[in-house]
Each structure stands twice: as structure tokens, then as C-alpha cells.
Amino acid sequence: MAGYQPPLFSTPLYLLVPVYETVKGVEKKSYPEPDAGMLFYASFRTFGGTETMENDIYSVVDTASVETWYRPDIASGCRIMRAVDGAVYEIVGEPENIGMRGQFLKCRVRRVKGGA
């Protein structure tokens, strides 16, 4: 019986774990600068984005699929940053522990761009 075979983990990524701070009674979330201790390698595949229609406006959201070794610190509130170009992505939903074996992890991510 063949088990799950992951793709090659060749893309360097940084894990950005949020830091919560209470300012005037309101909890504020921020992300620290990446450091070498948070570097990991993964399979990072994009599919040309996801087409969406909101308020009669057509847009393409830059999405990707990430597969890597299982790490319990990779959670839905975290972000990842590609080490090559600095592109930042937020994790969408809860990462999947493939086969519940604590060996491989898979998640979907969405690009974080701009700001208002």
C-alpha cells in the first residue's frame, strides 16, 4: 500500500507568527520581521489565482498551495513570506495535518498586498 508522497520541498519560506499587544483596551496584531530561525522549505504552487466577483467587481486573488513537513506552530493566524522575493501570504483556513500522522502539512494561502 502506497502512502502519501509529497512533492519536493525546495522553496524557502519564513513563518511569521503574530504578536498580540493590547493598546487602549484593544488587542492589536502585528507580525515580526523574519529571522533565520523561522526559515523552512516547502512546495509552493500557484495556480494563476482565484477569480472572484464582489460588488459587481471582477478580481483575481493570488492564491497558492503549500506543502511541507508538519510543524505545530504553523496555524491559521500566521503568515508566510517567500524568502526569494519577500511576497507575504496569509494562511486561509486551518492547515491540514495529512493523515493525522504529524508528518506532512498542507494549507492554502492568499497574497497580502497593499493597504488602506
Image (cartoon, helix red, strand yellow):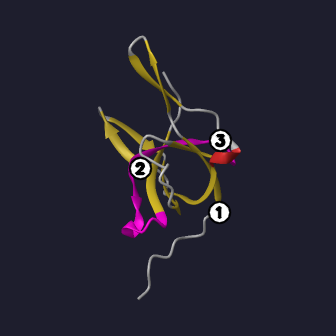
In the image, which residues are magenta?
A: 83-104
For discs 1 and 2, the disc positioned in front in the rendered view: 1
Three-letter amino acid code at the position of disc 2:
Thr
Three-letter amino acid code at the position of disc 1:
Ser
Three-letter amino acid code at the position of disc 3:
Gly
- Which quadrant of the rendered structure holds the N terminus? bottom left
Tell me, yes or no, whether the highlighted magenta stretch contains residue 96.
yes
Label 1 vs 2, first from the N-terminus: 1
Image quarter of residue 60: top left
Location of mark 2 (residue): 50
> Where residue 43 sits in the image (x, y, percent)?
57, 62
Residue in the picture at 52% in, 71% down: 6
Closer to us: 65 or 73: 73
Would residue 75 appear left or right of 84 to someone viewing this image? left
Helix, strand or loop at mark 2: strand
In 3D space, how far apart are the residues under numbered discs 3 and 1 (Cα atoms)? Answer: 16 Å
Crowd rating for badge 1 (residues with CA inside 10 Å; few <14, some 14–19, many 20+):
few
The reply to whether callout 3 and callout 1 are in contact (CB within 8 Å) is no
Q: Is residue 100 above or below residue 14?
A: below
Label 3 vs 2, first from the N-terminus: 2
Crowd rating for badge 3 (residues with CA inside 10 Å; few <14, some 14–19, many 20+):
few
Helix, strand or loop at mark 1: loop
Location of mark 1 (residue): 10
> Where residue 57 sits in the image (x, y, percent)?
35, 34
Residue in the picture at 60% in, 42% down: 87
Label 3 vs 1, first from the N-terminus: 1
Q: Is residue 18 above or below residue 24?
A: below
In 3D space, how far apart are the residues under numbered discs 3 and 2 (Cα atoms)? Answer: 21 Å
